[in-house]
Amino acid sequence: MPTLDLPRIAIFAAGLVCVTFHAAGQSPQMQKVTFEVGTVSQADVSQRLRRLRSKDSEREAELKAMFAEEGCTGEQMAEEVVQRKGPPNIICTLPGTTQSRIIVGAHFDHAPEGDGAVDDWSGASLLPSIYEALKAGPRKHTIELIGFTLEERGLLGSALHVKHLTAEQRDSIRAVVNLECLGLASTEVWVHAADPRLLDLLDRLAWSVKIPLKRVDVQAVGNDDTQAFRDKKIPSITLHSLTQESLLVIHSRRDKLAAVNAEKLYESFRLAAQYVAYLDQVLE
């Protein structure tokens, strides 16, 4: 595994990624894609994870506060009411030079058993760090970082968000990157539910920046917030860290901060932030 000191010095200053495109009947050609991401330390990522709260309403407030600390306020910050008495979806928008959008999502609510540190504060707490990393440079796509509510009650927050999108808004979404149950192991991708092109681009990037990536499907044990987007044929992909052994952690009293490996979570953060910056460059 790569050390944690190296990424702080090199990887998050800027990224220069070499990807290979194979055209039928032609020899492989190399194309260099340059993207910039800001410096975010492992200490900062871990500190945001530790801001876990016991109530979903407190978690929503904490997520909004973390965004505000990085400058996502005013017109960039929005709340989307899902149920009148429950916490809303939180939407932080990083404007781009076009109306085309990339959504990065994670749910902040949790199941009754356990503290929900893994499922899914591990993903939700990364959203402000990804915003911090991406705001370092200009973006072609408008990037929306969404903390979804009521995922554990039937994916209600993401379903309502998609339901309220106009046809034009749906057509403007180029990719949805969902962060779910991270920090238990190295980053994994849910292949069964992944858009083929987004999966191919993730494979290329992970290989180029030398961050471990495994293919582990989870449809036999549950669903996630990409479902509503996939139902509308919007390209989506989910990053997670669940294994056969770690499945017993989620929705149990073992789902506490101690279950999250700080190094693995930071590794997933590095991959996710660079992946979104990479998509911003290569997607039309």
Image (tube, rainbow, N blue to C red):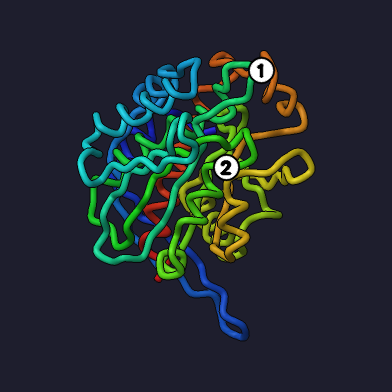
In the rendered image of this protein, does residue 131 appear above or below residue 246? below
Residue 154, image x and y in percent? 64, 40
Residue in view at x 36 percent, y 40 percent: 79
Asked whether residue 203 is in view, the answer is no
Residue 195, image x and y in percent? 60, 61
Q: Secondary structure at mark 2?
A: helix
The residue to which callout 2 is attached is 156
Residue in view at x 43 percent, y 39 percent: 89
In the rendered image of this protein, does residue 167 appear above or below residue 126? below
Mark 2 Cα-neighbour bin, 10 Å: few <14, some 14–19, many ≥20:
some
Q: Quadrant of the image for the N terminus?
A: top right
Cα separation between marks 1 and 2: 19 Å
Which amino acid is tagged 2?
A: Leu
Residue 82, image x and y in percent? 48, 40
Asked whether residue 210 is in view, the answer is yes
Residue lying farthest bottom? 25
Residue in view at x 41 percent, y 28 percent: 60
Q: Secondary structure at mark 1?
A: loop
The residue to which callout 1 is attached is 113
Q: Residues at badges 1 and 2 in contact (C-beta under 8 Å)?
A: no
Q: Quadrant of the image for the C terminus?
A: bottom left
In the displayed structure, does residue 183 sit left or right of residue 126?
A: right
Give 132 or 57, whichever is nearer the viewer. Answer: 57
In the displayed structure, does residue 8 sit left or right of residue 156?
A: left
Residue 132, image x and y in percent? 29, 38
In the rendered image of this protein, does residue 246 appear above or below residue 189? above
Give 3 or 67, whichever is nearer the viewer. Answer: 67
Residue in view at x 34 percent, y 24 percent: 44
